[in-house]
Image (cartoon, grey):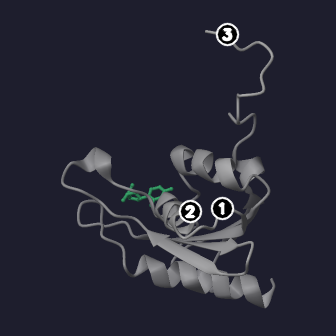
Amino acid sequence: MSETYVLLVGAACEARQQSYSPYSGFRVGAALLCADGRVVTGTNVENASLGLSLCAERAAVVRAVAEGRREFKAVAICADGDRPTPPCGACRQVLLEFAPDAEVIIVGALGCDGEMIRTTVRDLVPHGFTDFRDGTDRPTT
Ligand code: THU
């Protein structure tokens, strides 16, 4: 794995340390490698109203977009536990919006020293729902 990706995984694992997850106790960190080379991280932020909890991957995307970054080459995800935890469906859909071709590197708490899943956003979302605006069968009203 390239040094850039090792650093990206490290950034995701570090972001996980900032997790606000008093309800689940499950910490997740995500790090996006942006087209300009910058790394933007996110972590999961839970709420007493449990359904409002925000996942690390979406937190990272929202932060990057707010910074003017919308193109991502890769995303690393680091969650608690020995095994890698793949992203939830909502996060896959949000990643698909901005970075269908991005590489996805998923690790557990051991980071690069543990088990790793390497895939792409597109492979995580087969037959995904994407921009519908150029559809020919779209109703006109
Ligand atoms: N979580 C993430 O941060 N990313 C995912 O893709 C799945 C779940 C968080 C949300 C919640 O704070 C905790 O993990 C347990 O579901």
Q: Which one is in front, 26 or 81? A: 26
The first of marks 3 and 2 along the sequence is 2
- Which of the image's four quarters has the C terminus? top right
Q: Position of residue 32 (x, y in %)?
A: 62, 71
The residues bearing labels 3 and 2 have C-alpha atoms spaced at a distance of 31 Å
Element carrying mark 1: loop
Which label sits on residue 65? 2
Asked whether disc 1 touches disc 2, contact meaning CB atoms under 8 Å apart, the reply is: yes
Q: Residue furthest front?
A: 141
At label 3, counting other C-alpha atoms closer than 10 Å, the crowd grade (few under 14, some 14-19, many 20 or more) is few
Q: Which one is in front, 113 or 67? A: 67
The residues bearing labels 1 and 2 have C-alpha atoms spaced at a distance of 5 Å
The three-letter code of the residue at mark 1 reads Arg
Residue 106 drawn above or below residue 4: above
| Residue sitting at x 66%, y 88% | 7
The first of marks 1 and 3 along the sequence is 1
Residue identified by numbered label 3? 139
Q: Does residue 103 appear to the left or right of 32 in the view shown?
A: right
Element carrying mark 2: helix
The image quadrant of residue 25 is bottom left
- Which of the image's four quarters has the N terminus? bottom right
Q: Position of residue 59 (x, y in %)?
A: 46, 63
Residue identified by numbered label 1? 70
The three-letter code of the residue at mark 3 reads Pro
Residue 48 drawn above or below residue 75: above
The first of marks 1 and 2 along the sequence is 2
Q: Position of residue 2 (x, y in %)?
A: 81, 86
The three-letter code of the residue at mark 2 reads Val
Q: Position of residue 97 (x, y in %)?
A: 66, 47
Element carrying mark 3: loop
Residue 30 in view here: yes
